[in-house]
């Protein structure tokens, strides 16, 4: 049984006339008759009485008419739902982002998207780079935004922004005076770091390696699961760290932290998608907005 057969049946039943139904559907009369015959033969039941040159619904046909109308109504509603989703009038967009991006870069983009498409619900999850990549791989997030690099062949990666890491120390620390920081000093310092798997930590380890300092040599005094916790621990004098300039800005302006004289390379903010899944209309539009 197909939707086209149901449409033909309803058209004939409502008009009690094959020719008029064929005209309304823009079909040949023979095609309408064949559709009704196929439906009756498939289920072994007569839907119409052929009375003289006219037709009448059988009891089975009258019972079936209500069901057929209901199915067609649901099909029409489904088509309208797809049209609304395609037109960005409704739907849900699922995004996962690493902490720095979620807290400091993404909100303005979400606000702009929401203003442009108020019918789209936004669901945002926050994790480290590894967790965000896992969510995109699973399909629980349609789009992911990460600070680090990820080596997962099914994932596509596009740079959407750049960020600057800064080396931070408590006020009064010897590095706060602007003197150059040597590789030996970096290795000898007490560090407060994000957890392994975070983009911030990965970027710092890459930067230190380029300066000739093995991450394995670092004296890690404390590992914490959020940028804000790391920032607070350094403000309290536990050690030194490197964070995004955007994360550090409030504490630097308030004099709670000082910036050491070490130039760290910038890093990329990346959009990741699954290469084997086609983005929905909302995801595709959001990608256009952040790429622009």
Image: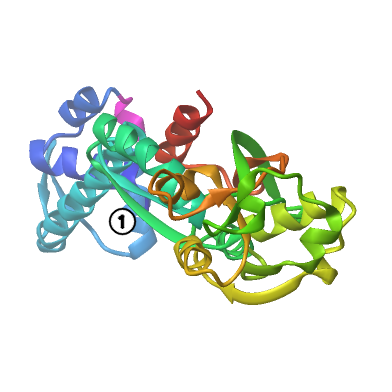
Q: Is residue 32 above or below residue 175?
A: above
Left/right placement of residue 184 relative to residue 145 reads right
The spot of residue 194 in percent (x, y) is 60, 66
Residue 140 placement (x, y as % from top left): 49, 62
Q: Can the viewer see residue 142?
A: no
Structural crowding at the residue carrying mark 1, measured as other residues with C-alpha within 10 Å and reported as few (<14), some (14–19) or many (≥20): some
Magenta region, main secondary structure: helix
Q: Nearer the viewer, residue 30 or 91?
A: 91
Q: Quadrant of residue 116?
A: top left
Q: In the shown orientation, is residue 280 left or right of residue 28?
A: right
Query: What residue do we see at 58% from left, 65% from top?
Result: 131
Q: Residue furthest right?
A: 212
Rendered residue at 23%/42% (across/down): 76
Residue 220 within the magenta-colored segment of the rendering: no
Provide the residue designation for mark 1: 40
Stretch in magenta? 27-32
175 or 86, which is in the foreground?
Answer: 175
Residue 227 locus on image (x, y percent): 50, 61
In the image shown, does 150 or 28 lie closer to the viewer?
Answer: 150
Q: Is residue 29 magenta?
A: yes
Q: How many marks?
A: 1
| Colour mode of the rendering | rainbow
> Which corner quadrant holds the N terminus?
bottom left
Q: Name the quadrant containing residue 55.
A: top left
Q: Is residue 75 left or right of residue 2?
A: left
């Amino acid at each position: 049984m197909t939707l086209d057969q149901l449409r033909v049946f309803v058209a004939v039943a409502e008009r009690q006339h094959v020719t008029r139904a064929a005209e309304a559907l823009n079909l040949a009369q023979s095609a309408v008759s064949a559709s009704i015959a196929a439906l009756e033969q498939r289920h072994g039941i007569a839907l119409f009485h052929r009375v003289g040159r006219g037709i009448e619904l059988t009891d089975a046909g009258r019972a079936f008419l209500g069901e057929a109308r209901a199915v067609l109504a649901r099909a029409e509603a489904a088509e309208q739902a797809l049209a609304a989703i395609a037109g960005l009038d409704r739907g849900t967009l699922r995004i996962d982002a690493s902490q720095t991006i979620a807290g400091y870069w993404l909100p303005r983009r979400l606000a702009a998207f929401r203003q442009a498409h108020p019918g789209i619900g936004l669901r945002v999850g926050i994790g480290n780079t590894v967790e965000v990549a896992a969510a995109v791989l699973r399909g629980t997030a349609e789009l992911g935004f990460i600070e680090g690099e990820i080596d997962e062949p099914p994932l596509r990666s596009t740079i959407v922004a750049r960020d600057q890491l800064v080396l931070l120390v408590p006020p009064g620390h010897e590095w706060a005076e602007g003197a150059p920081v040597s590789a030996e000093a970096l290795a000898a310092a007490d560090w407060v770091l994000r957890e392994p798997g975070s983009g911030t930590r990965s970027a710092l380890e890459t930067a230190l390696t380029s300066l000739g300092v093995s991450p394995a040599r670092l004296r890690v005094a404390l590992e914490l699961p959020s940028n804000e916790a790391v920032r607070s621990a350094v403000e309290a004098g536990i050690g030194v760290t490197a964070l995004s300039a955007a994360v550090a800005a409030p504490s630097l302006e308030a004099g709670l932290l000082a910036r050491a004289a070490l130039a760290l390379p910038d890093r990329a903010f990346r959009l990741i998608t699954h290469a084997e899944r086609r983005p929905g209309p909302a995801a595709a539009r959001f990608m256009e907005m952040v790429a622009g």
